[in-house]
Amino acid sequence: MAQPEYWNDSSSTDTDEEWEQDAQMFAMFVQQPTASSSIPRSRAPNIDRGRVEANARLITEYFCDYPTYPDDMFKMRKDLFIRIVNDLSTRYPYFRQHYDAAGCPGFSPLQKCTAAIRQLAYGITGNAFDEYLRMGATTTGDCLNTSAWELYNSMEN
Protein backbone atom coordinates (compact mmCIF):
# COMPACT_ATOMS: atom_id res chain seq x y z
CA MET A 1 0.00 0.00 0.00
CA ALA A 2 1.42 3.34 -1.03
CA GLN A 3 1.86 6.05 1.54
CA PRO A 4 0.07 9.37 1.08
CA GLU A 5 2.13 12.16 -0.41
CA TYR A 6 2.33 14.08 2.87
CA TRP A 7 4.16 11.12 4.50
CA ASN A 8 7.07 11.29 2.09
CA ASP A 9 10.37 12.41 3.51
CA SER A 10 10.86 14.72 0.55
CA SER A 11 8.18 17.06 1.95
CA SER A 12 10.54 18.11 4.71
CA THR A 13 11.74 20.94 2.45
CA ASP A 14 8.48 22.91 2.85
CA THR A 15 8.81 26.67 2.82
CA ASP A 16 7.58 29.00 5.50
CA GLU A 17 4.58 29.93 3.34
CA GLU A 18 3.54 26.28 3.07
CA TRP A 19 3.86 25.86 6.84
CA GLU A 20 1.73 28.96 7.36
CA GLN A 21 -0.95 27.63 4.99
CA ASP A 22 -0.92 24.27 6.76
CA ALA A 23 -1.26 25.99 10.13
CA GLN A 24 -4.21 28.08 8.90
CA MET A 25 -5.96 25.03 7.47
CA PHE A 26 -5.43 23.16 10.73
CA ALA A 27 -6.82 26.08 12.74
CA MET A 28 -9.90 26.22 10.49
CA PHE A 29 -10.40 22.48 10.89
CA VAL A 30 -10.14 22.64 14.67
CA GLN A 31 -12.55 25.56 14.93
CA GLN A 32 -15.25 23.95 12.77
CA PRO A 33 -18.24 22.84 14.82
CA THR A 34 -18.95 19.17 14.71
CA ALA A 35 -22.37 17.59 14.73
CA SER A 36 -22.02 16.53 18.35
CA SER A 37 -20.88 19.96 19.58
CA SER A 38 -24.37 21.39 19.22
CA ILE A 39 -25.61 18.88 21.78
CA PRO A 40 -24.77 20.13 25.27
CA ARG A 41 -22.83 17.68 27.36
CA SER A 42 -24.32 16.96 30.72
CA ARG A 43 -22.98 15.35 33.81
CA ALA A 44 -24.92 13.08 36.05
CA PRO A 45 -26.73 15.20 38.61
CA ASN A 46 -25.28 15.41 42.08
CA ILE A 47 -27.32 13.48 44.59
CA ASP A 48 -27.98 15.33 47.80
CA ARG A 49 -27.50 12.57 50.34
CA GLY A 50 -28.10 14.89 53.28
CA ARG A 51 -24.55 14.94 54.59
CA VAL A 52 -25.05 18.22 56.44
CA GLU A 53 -28.07 16.84 58.28
CA ALA A 54 -26.17 13.61 59.02
CA ASN A 55 -23.34 15.63 60.54
CA ALA A 56 -25.76 17.59 62.70
CA ARG A 57 -27.38 14.33 63.85
CA LEU A 58 -23.97 12.84 64.67
CA ILE A 59 -23.05 15.85 66.80
CA THR A 60 -26.44 15.90 68.54
CA GLU A 61 -26.40 12.21 69.36
CA TYR A 62 -22.78 11.84 70.45
CA PHE A 63 -20.70 15.01 70.74
CA CYS A 64 -22.80 17.88 72.14
CA ASP A 65 -22.88 18.94 75.82
CA TYR A 66 -25.93 16.76 76.51
CA PRO A 67 -25.77 13.92 73.97
CA THR A 68 -28.62 11.53 73.25
CA TYR A 69 -26.44 8.55 74.15
CA PRO A 70 -24.33 8.54 77.34
CA ASP A 71 -20.54 8.22 77.20
CA ASP A 72 -20.39 4.95 79.16
CA MET A 73 -22.25 3.14 76.39
CA PHE A 74 -19.30 3.11 73.97
CA LYS A 75 -16.12 1.11 73.65
CA MET A 76 -13.97 4.22 73.16
CA ARG A 77 -13.91 7.26 75.41
CA LYS A 78 -15.17 10.43 73.77
CA ASP A 79 -12.04 12.42 74.65
CA LEU A 80 -9.85 9.80 72.94
CA PHE A 81 -12.02 9.89 69.82
CA ILE A 82 -11.93 13.71 69.74
CA ARG A 83 -8.14 13.57 70.11
CA ILE A 84 -7.90 11.22 67.12
CA VAL A 85 -10.16 13.48 65.05
CA ASN A 86 -8.14 16.57 65.96
CA ASP A 87 -4.81 14.86 65.26
CA LEU A 88 -5.93 13.54 61.89
CA SER A 89 -7.54 16.78 60.74
CA THR A 90 -4.48 18.78 61.84
CA ARG A 91 -1.92 16.54 60.16
CA TYR A 92 -3.71 15.32 57.05
CA PRO A 93 -5.68 17.52 54.63
CA TYR A 94 -7.98 14.64 53.67
CA PHE A 95 -9.61 14.77 57.10
CA ARG A 96 -10.39 18.48 56.96
CA GLN A 97 -13.78 19.66 55.82
CA HIS A 98 -13.70 20.97 52.27
CA TYR A 99 -16.25 22.89 50.22
CA ASP A 100 -17.18 22.19 46.62
CA ALA A 101 -17.39 24.74 43.81
CA ALA A 102 -20.98 25.60 44.74
CA GLY A 103 -19.96 26.30 48.33
CA CYS A 104 -21.61 23.20 49.77
CA PRO A 105 -19.73 21.61 52.67
CA GLY A 106 -18.20 18.18 52.26
CA PHE A 107 -18.00 15.56 54.98
CA SER A 108 -16.81 16.78 58.35
CA PRO A 109 -13.77 15.36 60.11
CA LEU A 110 -16.13 13.71 62.60
CA GLN A 111 -17.97 11.89 59.82
CA LYS A 112 -14.77 10.73 58.12
CA CYS A 113 -13.17 9.50 61.34
CA THR A 114 -16.38 7.84 62.51
CA ALA A 115 -16.59 5.90 59.26
CA ALA A 116 -12.95 4.81 59.44
CA ILE A 117 -12.95 3.81 63.10
CA ARG A 118 -16.25 1.94 62.87
CA GLN A 119 -14.95 -0.06 59.94
CA LEU A 120 -11.83 -0.94 61.90
CA ALA A 121 -13.68 -1.67 65.14
CA TYR A 122 -16.61 -3.70 63.83
CA GLY A 123 -15.23 -5.08 60.56
CA ILE A 124 -18.19 -3.87 58.53
CA THR A 125 -18.18 -2.78 54.91
CA GLY A 126 -18.52 0.76 53.63
CA ASN A 127 -22.11 0.19 52.47
CA ALA A 128 -23.30 0.16 56.08
CA PHE A 129 -22.66 3.89 56.48
CA ASP A 130 -25.00 5.14 53.80
CA GLU A 131 -28.00 5.15 56.11
CA TYR A 132 -26.48 6.81 59.17
CA LEU A 133 -23.59 8.97 57.99
CA ARG A 134 -25.06 9.44 54.48
CA MET A 135 -21.70 8.43 53.05
CA GLY A 136 -21.26 6.16 50.04
CA ALA A 137 -19.13 3.03 49.98
CA THR A 138 -16.34 4.64 47.93
CA THR A 139 -15.97 7.53 50.35
CA THR A 140 -15.95 5.27 53.41
CA GLY A 141 -13.34 3.11 51.72
CA ASP A 142 -11.23 6.21 51.10
CA CYS A 143 -11.59 7.16 54.77
CA LEU A 144 -10.42 3.73 55.86
CA ASN A 145 -7.52 3.57 53.40
CA THR A 146 -6.35 7.06 54.25
CA SER A 147 -6.65 6.62 57.98
CA ALA A 148 -5.15 3.19 58.60
CA TRP A 149 -1.54 4.35 58.90
CA GLU A 150 -2.44 7.84 60.06
CA LEU A 151 -4.33 6.45 63.06
CA TYR A 152 -1.36 4.30 63.94
CA ASN A 153 1.07 7.22 63.54
CA SER A 154 -1.06 9.67 65.53
CA MET A 155 -1.37 7.28 68.48
CA GLU A 156 2.32 6.37 68.36
CA ASN A 157 3.35 9.90 69.42
Image (cartoon, rainbow, N blue to C red):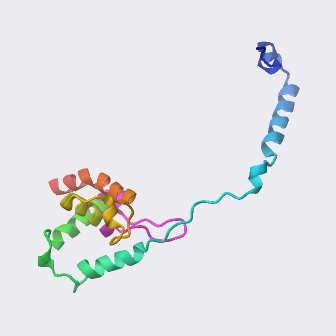
Residue under the image location 29 percent in, 82 percent down: 60
Q: Is residue 157 visible?
A: no
| Residue 89 in the figure: left or right of residue 66 | right
Image position, residue 44 (x, y; %): 57, 61
Residue under the image location 76 percent in, 14 percent down: 1
Image position, residue 147 (x, y; %): 28, 55
Residue lying furthest left:
72
Q: Main secondary structure of the magenta part?
A: loop
Q: Is residue 79 above or below residue 6?
A: below
| Residue 100 in the figure: left or right of residue 107 | right
Image position, residue 98 (x, y; %): 43, 65
Q: Nearer the viewer, residue 130 or 12?
A: 130
Q: Is residue 106 magenta?
A: yes
Q: Nearer the viewer, residue 116 or 47?
A: 47
Q: How many marks?
A: 0
Residue under the image location 15 percent in, 53 percent down: 156
Q: Is residue 88 visible?
A: yes
Quarter where residue 42 is shown: bottom right
Residue segment shown in magenta: 91-112
Image position, residue 11 (x, y; %): 81, 17
Q: Is residue 101 above or below residue 38?
A: below
Residue under the image location 31 percent in, 64 percent down: 128
Q: Is residue 24 above or below residue 56?
A: above
Q: Is residue 34 magenta?
A: no
The quarter of the picture where the C terminus appears is bottom left
